Structure formats: structure tokens, C-alpha cells
Image (cartoon, grey):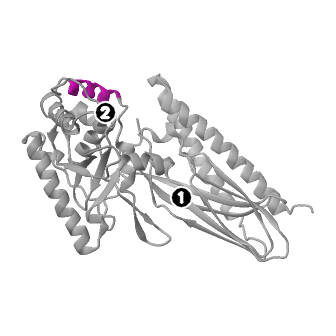
Amino acid sequence: MTPSPLELQRRERQKQYDLLVRQHAAASQQLQTTANAADRPLLEAQVAELTARLAAVWAQLNDLGQEPPAGLAIAIRPRMEQVYTALCDLFDPDERPLVEVELTNATAQPRRLLVRSHIQEYSHTAETTVSLAAGATTTVRQLPALRKPAVQGLSELTRAMLSVAVSDLDTGRALQQESVRIVLLARNAAPIAARDPSTNAWIDLTRYLAAFVTPNAGAVLETLRQAVDRHPARRLAGYQADVVLQVNALYDVLKHDAGIAYIDSQSSFNPDAAALDQRVRLPSESLRLRSANCIDGVLLFASLLEACTLSPALIISRNHALVGWETGRGSGAWEYLETTVLATNDFAEARKLGRRKAAFLQEQAARTGDATWFRRWPVKTLRTQHHITPLE
């Protein structure tokens, strides 16, 4: 069947758009990696021009109209208004997709469809081919992989455009295209919660804080080496030796050698009122700046615990965080530590304070039935079962 003039025009615009996407990605990467400051103005102008051309061609595509054929229903639903650029690629698309597309074939013939989505300028294109039987309905969930060079330098909230398209593979016809505004969060934005725009519900993402636990970072390993000198036996042997003495050595190296000071900053870990731009420091940054707020200190201490083969846990309450560790390998028994008193209290006092706060928070969770009062996230479990790997 010969395509209509409108369909031929649509196909030509789609080709133009796809070419511009590739050109924009190449120019953006060159801008991110150039070492010659003299080249930057020209590259910035090139990226800006390509961005404008992308927007113009996309608008032309939308203006052409994409009514699906009778009997084929397409519903495009964004599922994430705010994108955690440091962690988005760790999410399971089935659990936390960026977008989902529901396809219903009410015709008597099977259909072969292609669903594509991408964040303009910032991601690769996710593609899913669907063989949809007559009378069938299916939902495609996609989470396009971010382009690392494009998002690496994001230090502030950035607005972007999510583009979604559905086409017929048998005819090559574009059936439906939509563009939706989304927000990209800075690379150091903590995964506290995200709102699902299709349900208006807050989704608790605090377990992804484990990505900021970085036991293999150079600064963490260097600090671990210093902690050896703080241990009475000058060795850190994990669960093969006295655990409390090792944790004490880690506390002392942060207190006396690293000189970590507590910096008060407002933190909310309540999914019902989460600050979407809650910032955290990677442990290497906390060590460099010699300062940490409650969550920064917890992530730093958990990194040291994991680096010496102990099993740490992140204790996240509604407005505070503690660090915990398993008292014996696989014991299921936990001890707790308050990290905000590094500069003022010794290890015994910080341990006692951590125990008392943990007990209070557990009691609150049990009394109210609200689990957000006490969320204990064992890092080992998050690594093995949820595949949350360190950011560095």
C-alpha cells in the first residue's frame, strides 16, 4: 500500500529528528570533554543551534498529527517527574520506569509496534518491539539509560524534555508521539523519594542511599589505612577479630586524624514531605572538606565499615540517620552509632547515644505503625538483592 503524502512527510521529519539527535549527542559530548577553552564558545553555539533545531522538528512532528488507526489505543503515562541522575540507571524499569505505554489492539489482526523514548540531550534511546495479538493489551515500561558525559556536570536542577513515540513496524507509520517536561536532579541529589505523576503517590527511595556508600574510593581506603594505627593490635580483620575495637578505631580516625566536624543542615527522610533536592556528599568529599551532616557522616562511616569487611546498615528515620553494624557475621544482631557527635564525644558516648536513639525510633515505628520512623537498610542486602552498586 502506497503511503499517503502526509505519511511520507512524517517519515521525512522523523529521519531529520533522528539525525539531529545523533548530531546533538556528539556535539554535547565534545563540549563536555574538550580541554581547549578557546573551542568552548563555538561548541556551545553549536549545541544551542542543534537544540533549537531539535525543538523545531519535534514541534513539526507533533503538528502532523498521529491519530492511531481505529481499534488501536495508545496511552502514554510518565511515571517519574524528577530524575535522580546519579542513580537512575540503578532502578529496575519494571519497578521504577520513567514512562509506561499501554497498548490495546481491539482489531482482528495482530500488530507489530515499536515503542521508543529518550530524554532529549541527556539519554540514549530505549526501544521495545511489541508483537500485539488481536484483542490483546500490554504495557511497555522504559527507563532510557542516561548519557554519562551529558549528566556528569549537572550541579543544579535542570529542566528537560522526555520524548515518547509509537510506530507501526509493518507500515513504518508513526502512530503517536508525545513530549513531556521533566526535571533532572543534580548529581549529588539524595534518593529520598519521588512522586509518581500517574498516581500522585510518593515512592520511598531511601534504600538507594547505599550507592553513596563507597568502600573502594581512594580517600576511604587511605583513611582505613590510618585507622589501622588506631587499633590496639594494629590490624583490621573484619569478623575474624573483635568488632567493637575495630569500629572504635574507625571512629577515632575520623575524630582525631580526619577531623570531621558536624555541619548542621536540614534533612528530611519522610517520603510524604521529602525535599526533592536533598543534597549529600560522597565520603571522599566529606573527607576532603572535613565536615559532614547526619547523612554524610552515616555514609562515610558505612563506607569504612564495608571497606574492612564488616556489614553496615543505614538507619533512616523521618528527620535523622544513624549508622549500624552487624555484631557478628550473619548474626542478625545490630549495634548503632550516632555520627553527629564526632567532634564532641568519644566512641563509647556516641555508641550509647546511637543505641538509645535506635531504640526510640524502633518504638515509634511499632507504636504508630509507620515504618518511616525506622528503616534499617543492610548494605550487603542492597548490594546483592537490589544491585545497588557504589557510585565510585
Instruction: Indicate left or right for 121 with 263 as reference.
Output: right
Q: Nearer the viewer, residue 197 or 253?
A: 253
Q: Let me know if residue 219 is in the magenta part.
A: yes
Instruction: Indicate left or right for 65 with 171 as reference.
Output: left
Circle 2/circle 1 CB separation < 8 Å: no
Q: Is residue 7 above or below residue 135?
A: above
Amino acid marked by disc 1? Leu
**Quadrant occupied by the N terminus:** bottom right
Q: Let me know if residue 8 is in the magenta part.
A: no
Q: Is residue 193 visible?
A: yes
Q: Is residue 352 above or below residue 196?
A: above
Is disc 2 placed on a helix, strand or loop? loop
Number of numbered discs overlaid on the protein picture: 2
State the image quarter where residue 77 is shown: bottom right
Task: Read off the residue under disc 2.
Answer: 308
Q: Residue 118 in the image: x percent, y percent?
A: 59, 52
**Region in magenta:** 218-228
Q: Is residue 189 visible?
A: no
Q: Residue 379 in the image: x percent, y percent?
A: 36, 47
Q: Residues within 10 Å of mark 2 (few under 14, many from 20)?
A: some
Residue at (54% x, 34% y) in the render: 29
State the image quarter where residue 68 is shown: bottom right
Residue 47: mark in rendering: none
Residue 98: mark in rendering: 1
Residue at (31% x, 62% y) in the render: 274
Q: Nearer the viewer, residue 162 or 212?
A: 212
| Main secondary structure of the magenta stretch | helix
Label 2 to label 1: alpha-carbon separation: 37 Å
Q: Is residue 70 above or below residue 331?
A: below
Q: Residue 390 in the image: x percent, y percent?
A: 41, 40
